[in-house]
Image (spheres, rainbow, N blue to C red):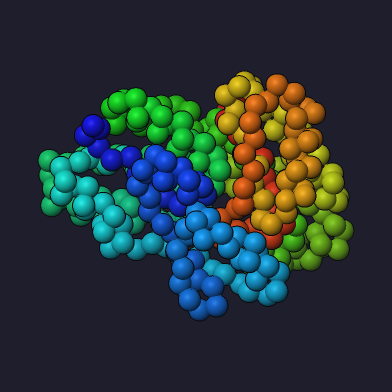
Amino acid sequence: MNPYVFMTDSDSDLPFRYVDELDMTMVYMPYILDGKEYFDDLGRSGRQKEYFDNMRAGAAPVTSLLPTAAYIEYFEPCFKDGKDILFVAFSSQLSGTINNVYAAREELLAKYPDRRMTVVDTLSISAPQTILILKAHELYRQGKSMDEVAQWLEENKLRAQAWFTVDDLKYLRRGGRIGAMAATVGTMLDLKPIITENRAGKLVSSDKVRGRKAALRLIADKAAENIDDPAQAMTIILHADAPEDAARLESMLRERVPALGEIQTYYVGPVIGAHCGPGTVAICFFGKERPC
């Protein structure tokens, strides 16, 4: 049995079946919809389509930081049981939440000085983080030490990539990712941004194209350029209630990378979906290091 707990958070959009199959310890992140707080259940409730239909109808979910006290509630039982913790966190560049992780760690290590806690900032969110989690958890199950698993994550985290586009720019505008004028002009011209996670762990626009079909083609092109070993790519297509476009993306990618193995397709989670909006589609994979 491992002397430490492998823990991560639901901003990875890790499907709940992995949590169950691998008995994985998760921190569940909050969001607020119509004045009520919920926690991302990783699709367990099966209400993903309903969530995005509500957004199309005008609902405006918001996300919030998980407080330090909540992290203490997650971490302290492990320390009480005499276990150390490896926490695989989503990108520090997309939220200040990781500061509460560090604060909880500092408080608990003062109380449990014989324990250790290593935090890995994956510089990823959503499916790229899922890919890193699954590959690192395999090492954990093999009995690798906390330092060995953390080192693998640090050495390989920039190989987890995401390329995606949104259907409606108003959600990026609402979240402060783009200005109101840029959103208005982009909508008028039917401009679709191609967004990626860069080497610093931020979301950046790499290109803009006119029209949805052109955006899907360019996403497939970007993925094909950056997948180096199809057998190890662990490819995931995410969508925010856009199953037809997700299927088109898979066909496009398989045309470009015929040797690609299994491609998983599933919904974007509610926390990520609150910022990107219905119709978002993405290709995520393990490949070359991020190009920007």
Nearer to the camera, 277 or 14 = 14
Seen at 73% across and 46% down, the residue is 246
Seen at 77% across and 50% down, the residue is 244
Q: Is residue 88 visible?
A: no
Q: Is residue 53 visible?
A: yes
Nearer to the camera, 36 or 113 = 36
Nearer to the camera, 5 or 94 = 5
Check the picture and name the quadrant holding the N terminus.
top left
The answer to whether 16 appears left or right of 192 in the picture is left
Seen at 63% across and 66% down, the residue is 50
Nearer to the camera, 69 or 9 = 9
**Residue 129 location (% of width, % of height):** 50, 41
Query: Which quadrant of the structure image shows residue 33?
Result: bottom right
The answer to whether 170 appears left or right of 127 in the picture is right
Question: For the image shown, how many numbered marks are present on the structure?
Answer: 0
The answer to whether 199 appears left or right of 182 in the picture is left
The answer to whether 255 appears left or right of 136 in the picture is right
**Residue 20 location (% of width, % of height):** 41, 46
Query: Which quadrant of the structure image shows residue 292?
Result: top right
**Residue 250 location (% of width, % of height):** 74, 37
Q: Say above or below: 214 vs 145.
A: below
Seen at 25% across and 32% down, the residue is 2
Q: Say above or below: 37 vs 136.
A: below
- The residue at the far bottom in this view is 35
